[in-house]
Image (cartoon, helix red, strand yellow):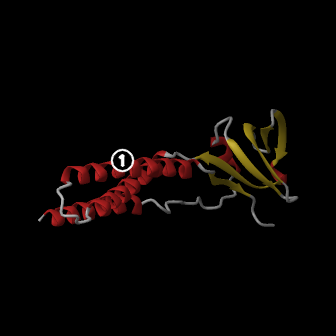
Amino acid sequence: MCIGKKRLTISLVLIASFVLSAGSITGQTTAAPTNDWSRLTAVESGSKLVIKLKNGKTVEGKVVSVSATAVSISIKGKPVELKRDDVRSVHQVMTKSASKATLIGLGVGAGAGAAAGAAASSSDTGFDFDKFDKAVTAGLTVVGAGAGALTGYLLGRRGGKRVLMYEAGQP
């Protein structure tokens, strides 16, 4: 009967960790391309922009101001004004929140740790190591949860999401 409870517990933990992680692995959405320059006025001052110019160059900087004919950005502390006619596309770089990835990593790590602990403690030696087995399972669950949360955090903070704010119409 004890082996049946362990298998049920392991199954429930694995199912829960799968459900927590399945919904948001590829939750990236992209904005539809637009040629509406006025969308740039909604960008807050100090936000990071990546601007691709019609001559092929790409510049990155922080927004200083936006007018109907130009965008002014700060590149390494120096102001640069780019005319609307020279701009091919503008992307706003949004920083990612690591909390979602951290929670997913926590769930997956805890599930993996619990499964490893249950597998390690299920060896039949004939002795009554029931309390020791539970401690091993609990310990591996905590270690797995910590390792998973750290991995999720590091992966979640990597890079930034680019949102297309403006794209010039095709000539």
Q: Left or right: 150 with respect to 82?
A: left
The relative height of residue 118 versus residue 106 in the rendered view (above or below) is below
Q: Residue furthest right?
A: 55
Q: Identity of the amino acid at label 1?
A: Val
What SS does tag 1 mark?
Answer: helix
- The quadrant holding residue 24 is bottom left
- Locate residue 48, reporting x and y percent: 69, 42
- Locate residue 111, reporting x and y percent: 35, 58
Residue beneath disc 1: 142
Look at 68% across and 35% down and name the residue there: 46
Name the foreground residue: 80 vs 19: 19
The answer to whether residue 100 shows anywhere in this view is no
Name the foreground residue: 55 vs 118: 118
Look at 66% across and 59% down and name the residue there: 34
Q: Left or right: 81 with respect to 132?
A: right
Look at 81% across and 32% down and name the residue there: 77
- Locate residue 67, reporting x and y percent: 75, 40
Q: Left or right: 87 with respect to 142?
A: right
Q: Left or right: 23 with respect to 54?
A: left
Q: Which quarter of the rendering shows the C terminus?
A: bottom right
Q: Which quarter of the rendering shows the N terminus?
A: bottom left
Look at 67% across and 42% down and name the residue there: 41
The answer to whether residue 124 shows anywhere in this view is yes
Label 1: few (<14), some (14–19) or many (≥20) C-alpha neighbours in 10 Å:
some
Name the foreground residue: 66 vs 46: 46
Name the foreground residue: 61 vs 16: 16
- Locate residue 4, reporting x and y percent: 16, 66
